[in-house]
Amino acid sequence: MIVKVLLIASILAALAWMLRARPTGRRLAVTRLAGLAAAVCWIVAVLDPGLVSWVANLVGVGRGTDLVLYALVVVFLFTTVGLYQRLKHLEAEIAELARDGALLRYEVEHRPSGNERR
């Protein structure tokens, strides 16, 4: 039962993460800390695989491998959401640069030269 609550909470957290407008410094720090925590968990899991099975049983998952799979799905979900947001932000920046370039080109091409009379 605990694992169901954790998985649903992680999906809701990913949804809230996705709906936030812009990345902030705090968000970057949280992302880095989460990555560090995940790395430490994976190292501990490699050193003591029995601990993974124990944690899995503690949260209501039958096997440690299932818990690892669930964790990877959650990590993949957050990674996908983060990449989607980054891509969306970059597309907006490219569109703005393209508009600025088009306006600048128009101004240069339609600027009156010094030889013309008004």
Image (tube, rainbow, N blue to C red):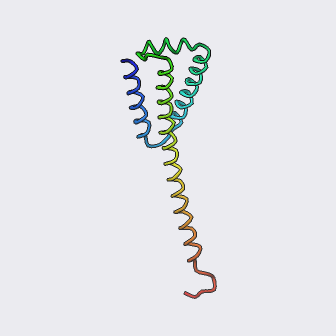
Drawn side of residue 102 relative to residue 12, left or right: right
Residue 29 in percent (x, y) is at 55, 31
Q: Position of residue 78 (x, y in %)?
A: 48, 34
Residue at left offset 51%, top offset 23%: 68
Between 60 and 19, the one nearer to me in the picture: 60
14 vs 107: above or below: above
Q: Is residue 12 above or below residue 94?
A: above
Q: Residue at x 47, y 21 (%)?
A: 67
Image position of 6 (left or right of 113): left
User: Is 102 left or right of 115, judged from the image as shown?
Assistant: left
Q: Quadrant of residue 94?
A: bottom right
Work out whether residue 16 or residue 79 is closer to the camera in this orientation and state it. 79
Q: Quadrant of residue 49?
A: top right
- Locate the N terminus by quadrant: top left
The one nearer the camera, 104 or 35, is 35
Residue at the location (52% across, 47% down)? Answer: 87
Q: Position of residue 73 (x, y in %)?
A: 48, 30
Report x, y in % for residue 101.
57, 64
Q: How many marks?
A: 0
Please identify the quadrant where the C terminus is shown: bottom right
Give the camera-side residue of 45 and 117. Answer: 45
